[in-house]
Image (cartoon, coloured by chain):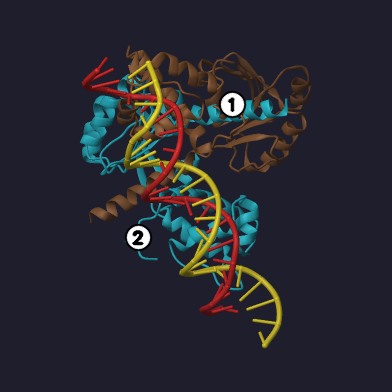
Chain colours: A brown, B cyan, C red, D yellow
Amino acid sequence: MDSSKKISQAVIRRLPRYYRYLKDLYREGISRVSSKELSERMHITASQIRQDLNCFGGFGQQGYGYSVEALFKEIESILGLDTRYKLILIGAGNIGSALAKYENLSTRGFDLCAIFDVKEELIGKQLNDLMVQHIDNLKNYVMNNEVDIAILAVPHSATAKLAELVVGLGIKAIWNYSPSDLHFSHDVVIENVHLVDSLMVLGYNLKEKLKSID
Amino acid sequence: MDSSKKISQAVIRRLPRYYRYLKDLYREGISRVSSKELSERMHITASQIRQDLNCFGGFGQQGYGYSVEALFKEIESILGLDTRYKLILIGAGNIGSALAKYENLSTRGFDLCAIFDVKEELIGKQLNDLMVQHIDNLKNYVMNNEVDIAILAVPHSATAKLAELVVGLGIKAIWNYSPSDLHFSHDVVIENVHLVDSLMVLGYNLKEKLKSID
DNA sequence: TAGATTGTTAATCGATTAACAATC
DNA sequence: TAGATTGTTAATCGATTAACAATC
């Protein structure tokens, strides 16, 4: 549980999955779970579960297993889901407006506070309880309001410039849905999301599957 | 290039990224690229690029590099993006309708052909050029039309039952946006997508970043 | 106590990187 | 030919799995 020890991204990317499965167990009214039981549900090895959890601390009890509620709370806290983040959305097109309407964000502590776009016909449009503002207001908004994370959902051509702007204004995290990947220096954290990538992998795997049957 | 050799999912999951970067190069009018140049753009090692590509064949030329167009076409073909897939969407809620409106699907060869939901108020609703049908029509539709991939975007409570139905009807691939993960036997391929997972990882990394600055 | 299951070390496996001979 | 860069083997690194002593 030495906090100076760097935890690998492989482990971190599994945390949301643990979070989901534990939440399900909790909702089902199950109060304890062993690494073996959890491993069967999650289709990973019990060994991996114990290794992963021990990166953060000894949450279990020998001979007993893990308390579902306690472990859930631990992972919630590790992921920072017990604190709230303030988000802005840049780009109110197809993906952008879908994200704005996505209720799972606020239930996980991610509060969308403002929406910006450049297209005149979108300005003033209501998305949930927010009104789309002109991108020219962005600078002023960020200087007067706390912003933790910027969601970028703009076309290829606008991505680089807007990312520069956002980072220049001191925002340290970008959830990027734009077609082009972002790479910044180590003091900005980025998640590049490409929905279609996953579909391409699915298509590939389907093709291979069918090939092996023939 | 032995086709019997199993290619690791780690490599396969990078293919869409190669595809995107090569498409960009192609659009920029760049006709050749070395693994070193590509590695700088993509922020991965040149070694990895050469290893990855050589899983599928020797596409390069010593002393020259790779032809952007030829390599792009190769990867497009490996991913099966030169063939078309027929998709159905189950669940026309927030995520479902966003996916239905997502133009990037058809441009990559994924044609959405029918949409189903159970909610009376959604039946008959127009999404792009498709009308939402009642889920009771699903069986009949699948028996009379080719379907390669089902997109599942339904609530937790409906996921398992609908997945069973879809697999029972012989569909071999599911792009699953439902809150609960699906795991089927090896003859069905699944991609479980959880948008918020990526945001949670971003939140975690942001928190760690800020911690290290203090 | 006996049984169960963790936490943790050691072994294995796979993926990434480095190096370099082959060759365009 | 000389220079460049691939394809490929070997070395390294990291992640996963196995094993088991510790302990509830």
Horizontally, residue C24 falls left or right of residue C14, namely: right
Q: Could you say which quadrant of the image residue B148 lies in?
A: top left
Describe the element under mark 2 as helix, strand or loop: loop
Q: Residue at x 58, y 42 (%)?
A: A179
Sequence-wise first label, 2 or 1: 2
Describe the element under mark 1 as helix, strand or loop: helix
Horizontally, residue D16 falls left or right of residue B136, namely: right
Q: Name the residue nearer the viewer: A140 or A29.
A: A29
Q: Name the residue nearer the viewer: B174 or B133.
A: B174
Horizontally, residue B200 falls left or right of residue B81, namely: right
Q: Position of residue A136 (x, y in %)?
A: 76, 27
Q: Which residue is mark 1?
A: B203
Q: Name the residue nearer the viewer: A202 or B214.
A: B214
Q: Position of residue A15 (x, y in %)?
A: 47, 28
Q: Residue at x 49, y 21 (%)?
A: A75
Horizontally, residue B160 falls left or right of residue B103, namely: left
| Amino acid carrying mark 2 in the image | Lys
- Within 10 Å of the Cα at label 2, are there few (<14), some (14-19), or many (20+) other Cα atoms? few
Q: Which residue is mark 2?
A: B5
Quadrant location of the C terminus of chain B in the rendered image? top right
In three-dimensional space, the C-alpha distance between marks 2 and 1, rounded to whole angstroms, equals 39 Å
Q: Could you say which quadrant of the image residue B47 lies in?
A: bottom right
